[in-house]
Image: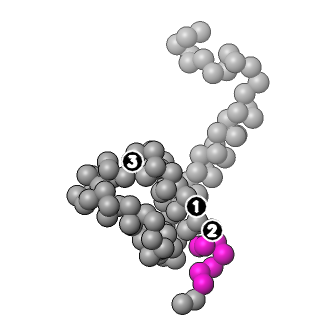
Amino acid sequence: MNESSPAAGERARKAHTLALQRISRIGQATVAQEVGVSPATVSRFVSEPDGLERACKVLAAVGLKVVPVTMQCFPPEKVAIFMTLARDHLNYLQRPEQLAFEDDE
């Protein structure tokens, strides 16, 4: 088996660590109930090298990463546009009064 690229390997390690932390926080019994398997199955999946660790390596190898469900993804080019617009506007402002709507004056 070929070793994955260093970047993919690092993503896999981070995903594995994050997954283990979340499983520990939530509890294997809760995860098992949610997935519809026994707690022993979750325990084996988490602890065996062919389980969670390999799953994280597969995700990293295909260019995916594990992030918390609360995270949102945005295309970098769109974020760059918004940042440029915000920066331009903030550079234009000299005093707080410039933020007031004309109806407020």
| Mark 1 vs mark 3, CA separation in Å | 19 Å
- Residue at 49% x, 56% y is 20
Amino acid type, residue under disc 1 in the picture: Lys
Would residue 59 be visible to someone looking at this image? no
Residue drawn at point x = 63 percent, y = 21 percent: 99
**Mark 2 → mark 3, Cα distance in angstroms:** 25 Å
Region in magenta: 3-9
Q: Position of residue 82 (x, y in %)?
A: 59, 46
Quick one: which residue is furthest to the top in this view? 105
The disc label shown at residue 10, or none: 2
Q: Residue 41 location in percent, x, y?
A: 31, 64
Of 39 and 59, nearer the camera is: 39
Residue 5 vs 64, above or below: the answer is: below
For residue 81, say whether it is visible.
yes
The answer to whether the residues at label 2 and label 3 have Cβ atoms under 8 Å apart is no
Callout 3 crowding tier (Cα within 10 Å): few <14, some 14–19, many ≥20: few
Q: Nearer the viewer, residue 102 or 79?
A: 79
Q: Is residue 6 above or below residue 47?
A: below
- Report the quarter where the N terminus lies: bottom right
Specify how the rendered protein is coloured: one colour
Q: Is residue 4 magenta?
A: yes
In the picture of the structure, the residue carrying the numbered disc 1 is: 14
Q: Provide residue 101's location: percent of width, then percent of height.
A: 56, 18
Element class at badge 1: helix
Which of pointers 2 and 3 lies earlier in the amino acid sequence? Answer: 2
**Res 27 label:** 3
Q: Are marks 2 and 1 in contact (CB under 8 Å)?
A: yes
